Amino acid sequence: MTHLLKKSVKLALVQLANGADKPRNLLHARAKVLEASKAGAKIIVLPECFNSPYGCQYFPEYAETLLPSPPSEEQSPSYHALSSMAKEAKAYLVGGSIPELVPDTKKYYNTSLTFDPAGQLLGTHRKIHLFDIDIPGKIRFQESEVLSAGNGITIVDLPEYGKIGVAICYDIRFPEMSIISARKGVFAMIVPGAFNLTTGKLHWELEARARAADNQIYVALCSPARDMNAMYHAWGHSTVVNPMAQVMSQASESEEIVYADLTPEEIAETRKAIPMYEQRRFDVYPDVSAGDIVFQEAPIGDVGK
Ligand SMILES: NC(=O)CC(=O)C(=O)O
């Protein structure tokens, strides 16, 4: 039997306490990634905007240039830090996200870089759904005032384990992305994210469990730690959900690494018990197809500049 996940693997979500000092954030992320690797994790995830505070006012100040790929150290210290961390940890690293500037177009993106254990870039995802919301009396956030949206769904092949879908935060609310990725054979959706005290309470765990239930895959959401002195108060609660949509591990609000052991059997057993994969009616809803979808499978440079 071929499995989506080729062999069991320990996943770690690093709920990082990051702040305004970028070099400190990079050093601190390294220490935590190495800690996770020491504990046996082979897939390690950092949060959204791990090298900066989260907020529209910060994106231009912290943005780095990733093109041409690979960028120089001066263009992107975070790219090089992530590549080294992955190599030192001997692990796959979904490097949270960083603000990216494309100088030719002067566009900013919220971009996630995934590296292999040799420190090679495997995949790039630019957040495709920008976080534009206005909940009266609670929170207004308009990423589109500064950022541009990416234009592709990202599936990254981790040769030893299989494929993951990478999405960033608000992307998880759009079930189509996870459905299409699952149909293309991912064993997990990996999502650096930073919900807040309003939306986190309402939807953080719900979205993770919903995507897992829809698709019978693992879903992992990795948040920054909560900092009540920051402008944006992250929800925390980094969470791993299994293919049966049960929470496997969850952090509190503060800095913490959460671990989960992912197994091929857990996916297979879920799909055997509830055989949705054999029961789908694409004859009834043929428009739900991945046929014309744009993928960002390649390292940056091959996707829309
Ligand atoms: N920060 C985000 O992109 C999304 C978020 O906080 C939410 O969906 O809620």
Image (spheres, rainbow, N blue to C red):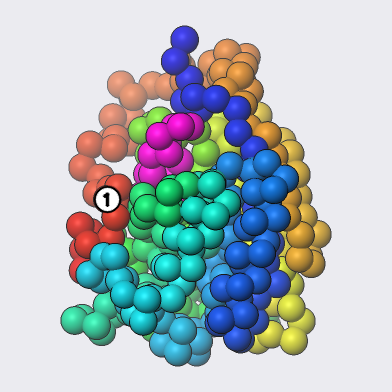
Percent position of residue 132, x then y: 47, 74
Residue reaching furthest top?
Answer: 1
On screen, 20 above or below 40?
below
Percent position of residue 21, x then y: 60, 86
The residue carrying mark 1 has its beta carbon less than 8 Å from ligand 1: no
Q: Which residue is the site of mark 1? A: 298
Percent position of residue 178, x then y: 45, 43
Query: Which residue type carries mark 1?
Result: Ala
On screen, 285 above or below 19?
above
Left or right of 139 in this view: 151: left
Tell me which corner region of the image, top left, top right, bottom left or bottom right, holds residue 65. bottom left
Q: Residue at x 47, y 10 (%)?
A: 1
Left or right of 232 in this view: 289: left
- Residue 23 lies in the magenta-colored region: no
Q: Residue at x 43, y 39 (%)?
A: 158
Q: Decide: few, some or many residues near mark 1? Use Cα within 10 Å; few <14, some 14-19, many ≥20.
A: some
Percent position of residue 179, x then y: 43, 38
Tell me which corner region of the image, top left, top right, bottom left or bottom right, holds residue 194. bottom right
Q: Residue at x 69, y 48 (%)?
A: 38
Tell me which corner region of the image, top left, top right, bottom left or bottom right, holds residue 193. bottom right
The quadrant in which the C terminus is found is: bottom left
- SS at mark 1? loop
Q: Residue at x 22, y 70 (%)?
A: 68
Residue numbers of the magenta segment: 153-166
- Residue 162 lies in the magenta-colored region: yes
Q: Which one is nearer the viewer's eye here, 232 or 121?
A: 121
Q: Which one is nearer the viewer's eye here, 93 or 268?
A: 93
On screen, 289 above or below 151?
above
Main SS, magenta region, reads strand
Is residue 14 among what the camera can see? no
Is residue 107 among what the camera can see? yes
